[in-house]
Image (tube, rainbow, N blue to C red):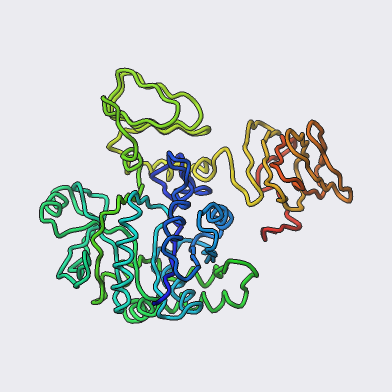
Amino acid sequence: MAKVVPVVLSGGSGTRLWPVSREGHPKPFMLLPDGQSLLSRAYERAAALASAGELLTVTNRDYYFLSRDEFAKRKNGSLTARFVLEPQGRNTAPAVAIAALCVAQAHGEDATILVMAADHLIQKPAAFDQAAARAVEMAARGDLLTFGIAPDRPETGFGYIETGEATGIADVFRVRRFVEKPDQERAKAFLKQGTFLWNSGMFCFQAGAVLRELAQHAPDVLEAAKACWSAAQGKRAEGDFVDLPAELFSRAPNVSIDVAVMEKSARVAVVRSDIGWSDVGSWEAVSRLLNADAAGNRTSGDTLVIDAADNFIMSEDRLVAALGVSNLLVVDTPDALLVAAKDRAQDVKRVVEALKSKGHETFRFHRTVARPWGTYTTLEEGPRFKIKRIVVKPGASLSLQMHHHRSEHWVVVKGTAKVTNNERESLVYTDQSTYIPSGNRHRLENPGKVELVLIEVQSGDYVGEDDIVRLQDKYGRS
């Protein structure tokens, strides 16, 4: 039996889920009400289906360490991970092409690729396993499979697939046509007709089959992918990732695998699936994951509603009270608050566009920012100063670095810090502090087995994050 290699595509920014999803910490890393991230859930689904013992993630190079941490949380400890790192997003066709080249090289062209999105939610895992098994069976015939979701409402936010004749495999049909997002009237007609499915954006095919179809229908995508893959082999770092060259990858056409291949190929079939699927693409979709009270309010976190109806309210760390309001989206985070009409959920991305145009940092980062070594949280900032809470993982270290415009004072509140300050190394214990003058080469390490937590006070003419000169870095950022 051919090997199955799950491929997780993790490149979306999730702008409609601001302020929780941001450029530096996008939708796949959002925590669901059960405390798991969407990406962690995707890895668990993939682990159950990976007969090749390997899982491949295609993601932006900025998300490599976050993705690796999520993979480490999986329940299947025997599975290994490989990462293909994109320097920028070029849509799904180049990502799938490079994944197919990677899988074909490692496991042969007969290996089956199961393409999954990092930011989808599937609430019926057993049904998904059955649908995937049918897709793998059909893919063994050389066909390209997509997963269609049985619709339960007239949805205008998804593309549709019209099913054709049966294939002889349960719930697998030939694809008659793909349809772009319809208006409300057409969506109602599709639901009534019963032969239309939502296009989920998940796929299954043999590596060789999709490469042949790319060669026929999108040769420019395939040639760009081959050039990137070949060049990446020459500069491949030791470890679990392949870093794609930025200049070559920028030449890849920015096109989806649907448009490039699936809508053109004569070998496309669809698995009709009832798997509890959601693309979690907007706050409206997130709200459907929560139970409503008698007045139709759906809430998460510390909330209070009085004489309010049909609202979605989410709070991360403080009380949000709603009085006498209706049909609102309210999403509160430590540094940004969204208040919107519920019927404008699809337009939240316009807020992100406006923040980008103004250069406002809240489109990019949260108050707490993840780094390969841990996290930092900005507690307060003003002219010529900034105060942070820094958490360093056991055994981790920041880069050897220096600052031109600021000095730093570190106070350890938990654990033990190993500090390099120019030529001097010292251990700083709980309730102790140390001072790093501007211009000094310095490094912070956690030599212990528990988290290191400290308060950092920066002062100087400029305290921006770009005043960092990395001299050495174990994470390859210098």
Question: At which x and y percent is residue 346?
Answer: 32, 44
Vertical comparison of 415 with 125: above or below? above
Query: Measuring 34% from the left and 60% from the top, which residue is drawn there?
Result: 129
Q: Quadrant of the N terminus?
A: bottom left
State which quadrant residue 263 falls in.
bottom left
The answer to whether residue 151 is above or below residue 179 is above
Q: Position of residue 432 (x, y in %)?
A: 82, 33
Residue 386, position as x, y percentages in the image: 68, 34
Is residue 315 depicted above or below 71 in this figure?
above
Q: Residue at x 45, y 57 (%)?
A: 11
Q: Closer to the camera, 314 or 182?
A: 314
Q: Residue at x 32, y 51 (%)?
A: 124
Residue 444 seen from this side: no
Numbered label tally: 0
Q: Is residue 126 visible?
A: yes
Q: Residue at x 56, y 57 (%)?
A: 68
